[in-house]
Amino acid sequence: MTNEVTTPAPSTAAPSVPASGTAPVEPAEAAADAPSAEPALAPASPVASDERNATLPHDLSPMGMFMAADWVVKAVMIGLAFASLVTWTIGLSKAMELALAKRRARVGVRRLARAETLTEALTANRRRWRGPVAALAQSAEAERARSADLSDDGIKERVSVALSRIEAGAGRSISRGTGILATIGSTAPFVGLFGTVWGIMNAFIGISQANTTNLAVVAPGIAEALLATAIGLVAAIPAVIVYNVFARSIAGYRAVLSDGSALVLQHLSRDLDRRHTTREAAPLMAAAE
């Protein structure tokens, strides 16, 4: 019996052919045409772009905010800075003037207190004596010399009027310039507030034009506006403090002048009484001789 080995017949099935008119798809091309697992990024909207631009760093230094401010706010800041300069200029000059005037007044009062008569006080300090207290003594002596033949009561009254005028003039002279300090101290905060209001209005207009409420858009404009108020306070607070210090110092200076005026009247009254006593004693002495 013969063993026969059967071999499988070769497959005659034809490979699958795509439909007519369609090119065969390669595996690499199919993988490339497959949808990506990551979604495509949507194009950035204009608002998002504006917000990203708004978050760029701003120069928030005082000079940077000043340069970026509106011209009205700049004018307010410059005016307030000038007012602050005026405050310190008046403060330094008036402080030196007050110190010198009070020193001269105290020296004059001490010289009057040491003297026995008004004439002695003037004679001993004729070359070295300056200031309002010296003017008080000189005015009293001049009035007494002009009214030598008149009544003592009339001399005292006229001297009192002359001394009051000298005191008032010295007070006005030493107070000159302090009114500017009072004006700056009372108006500078409101001027700075005006600059702040104007700057905030411009900031809100910029917000509406940018169509965003991002804090990075709002903050720089408001910071520039608030800088005007800060400068206003910097100008006003020293002005108020310096004005109050000068007011107390001027009151003390006037008190020293009033003391000097009282000493002058005291010396004058004593000298007139001595003269009156001498006149009354002269006939008696002549009769005794």
Image: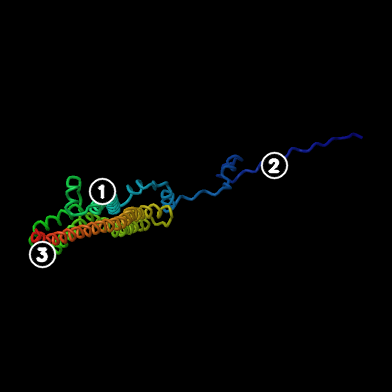
State the residue in front, 97 or 141: 141
Identity of the residue furthest to the right in this view: 1
Residue at point 41% right, 48% down? 53
Please tell me which of labels 2 and 1 falls first in the chain. 2
In which quadrant will I find the C terminus? bottom left
Query: Pointer 1: residues within 10 angstroms few (<14), some, or many (20+)?
Result: few
In which quadrant will I find the N terminus? top right
User: In the rendered image, which quarter is residue 21 located in?
Assistant: top right
Type of amino acid under label 2 = Ala
Q: Could one spot residue 195 in this view of the protein?
A: no
**Residue identified by numbered label 2:** 13
Q: Mark 3: which secondary structure?
A: loop
**Residue identified by numbered label 1:** 100
Distance CA(mark 2)–CA(mark 3)? 159 Å
Q: Mark 2: which secondary structure?
A: loop
Q: Is residue 11 above or below residue 130?
A: above
Asked whether disc 2 touches disc 3, contact meaning CB atoms under 8 Å apart, the reply is no
Distance CA(mark 1)–CA(mark 3)? 38 Å
Q: How many marks?
A: 3
Residue at point 36% right, 55% down? 226
Please tell me which of labels 2 and 3 falls first in the chain. 2
**Residue identified by numbered label 3:** 151
Query: Pointer 2: residues within 10 angstroms few (<14), some, or many (20+)?
Result: few
Q: Is residue 48 left or right of residue 3?
A: left
Q: Is residue 42 left or right of residue 18?
A: left
State the residue in front, 235 or 260: 260
Q: Give the mark toward the camera: 2 or 1.
A: 1
Please state the horizontal and vertical placement of residue 121, each as a whole percent of the image: 19, 51
